[in-house]
Amino acid sequence: MKYKTQKIAYAYFICALGLFAIQILGGLLAGWIYVSPNTLSEVLPFNIVRMLHTNSLIVWLLLGFFGAAYFLIPEEAEREIHSPKLAYIQLAILVIGTLGVVVTYVFNLFEGNFFLGKEGREFLEQPKWVKAGIVIAALIFLYNVSMTVLKGKKTVITNTLLLGLWGLALLFLFSFYNPDNLSLDKMYWWYVVHLWVEGVWELIMASILAYLMLKLTGVDREIVEKWLYVIVATALFSGILGTGHHYFWIGAPGYWQWVGSIFSAFEVVPFFGMMAFAFVMVWKGRRDHPNKAALLWSLGCATLAFFGAGVWGFLHTLHGVNFYTHGTQITAAHGHLAFYGAYVALNLAIMTYAMPILKNRDPYNQVLNMISFWLMSGGMVFMTFVLTFAGTIQTHMQRVVGDYYMDVQDALALFYWMRFGAGLVFFIGMLLFLYSVFVPRREIITAAVAEAAE
């Protein structure tokens, strides 16, 4: 660890991984409710379980991004973080807000209260006071990292990362606007949700992946930066107007069907670029880095992001197809693999690389870490195929033939059982990852004890 303030990242990573575990448990419970609908129906209804599952996903990914920034910016800027105290205050605000959200959701507190109660907007259900806290935390973060970069060395990686992080914070402000008109509500809602995951988050992903490739492969910085420029340009070109693929059926003007279809078709390009970038960097690389697990996660991230966000997104993005498939299990298939490939695997990659450095020891339990990669990735890919087949059947039975919704759900029971099984495999992989990151091998412990005894 070159800079003392890089240890800030460790606190963020621990909190992020804790929420990751909660998110997967929530997903397992939600998957079980699909096969046994009355489970905890009065204590913890499905809508609350789903909110916990999706909201914990968003928060832990953000904590991972913040931790990654606090880890890599000192090295890129060649100076310590501007204010470690502000970084820990920011983390405390986010943790308190998260706990407030969980308590509010589970116990259904302050129902209907403008400031304290939850809102009925998917992904943006947080009470107003929590959203205000998130904005304050984001402003603290942006001030902290921006001052660090401004006073230090500027690189394409830090510039891209800051552009993505500033965009993330500014776009979140649209979450405060909740118009009465449902079409307007959805338009502004997608300004946050789409322009995050298919816009500024892609910039964050590209910059962190570029940093990992730089460290793990030893490729010249100039080559990495040229690739980064291309990826950023294509991501912004396709992602901004690609928002239109969410406007097809919400009451927006008809031209959005063509704008959304055309530009969202181009959204495959930046993800293909990131996959090609990662493999070309490894091919050109001269460095035999000891952390093989981090390299596996980096390559897996780029590959699964291309298939989840790119290929599976394209499968139902054209308006002629989307007319039949929107809101089916095909959407769930795309969402699960896209989030896992692009952002979950990215966070786990930077954590796998950074944790040994933060703990000041060689990478350990790498085989176990790589097994966790294959279990989680295999479980998620199988779940994606299962949901894709379920969505195809659902589309035909429900949208073409016109069968009743609940009759269709009964017909999909086998697929939901397989989805739950895939979730169990993923859960086991997650436990192995946590063990591999936090628990040293027995011989390391033995060597440490012997050294202490001497």
Image (cartoon, grey):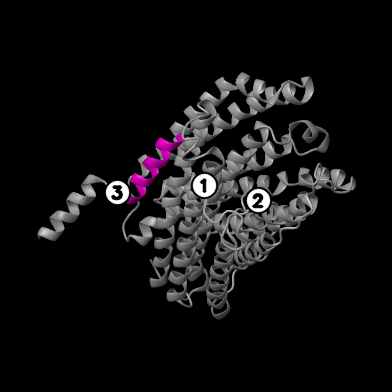
Q: Secondary structure at mark 1?
A: helix
Residue type at mark 2: give it: Arg
Work out how far the residue at label 3 is from the one at label 1, CA to CA, in angstroms.
28 Å
Kindly identify which residue carries mark 1. Answer: 52
Kindly identify which residue carries mark 3. Answer: 439
In the rendered image, which quarter is residue 331 located in? top right
Classed neighbour count for the residue bearing mark 1: other residues with Cα under 10 Å, few (<14), some (14–19), many (≥20):
many
Tell me if residue 232 is in the magenta stretch: no
Q: Position of residue 103 (x, y in %)?
A: 47, 53
Classed neighbour count for the residue bearing mark 2: other residues with Cα under 10 Å, few (<14), some (14–19), many (≥20):
some
Q: Of the residues under marks 2 and 1, which one precedes in the sequence?
A: 1
Q: Position of residue 9 (x, y in %)?
A: 43, 63
- The part of the chain drawn in magenta is 426-438
Q: Position of residue 250 (x, y in %)?
A: 80, 45
The answer to whether residue 168 is left or right of residue 348 is right
Q: Are marks 2 and 1 in contact (CB under 8 Å)?
A: no
Work out how far the residue at label 2 is from the one at label 1, CA to CA, in angstroms.
13 Å
Q: Are marks 3 and 1 in contact (CB under 8 Å)?
A: no
Which of pointers 3 and 2 indicates the residue nearer the eye? Answer: 2
Kindly identify which residue carries mark 2. Answer: 121
Count of marks overlaid on the render? 3
Q: Of the residues under marks 3 and 2, which one precedes in the sequence?
A: 2
Q: Nearer the viewer, residue 157 or 204?
A: 204
Q: Nearer the viewer, residue 313 or 118?
A: 118
Residue type at mark 3: give it: Val
Q: 220 above or below 282?
A: below
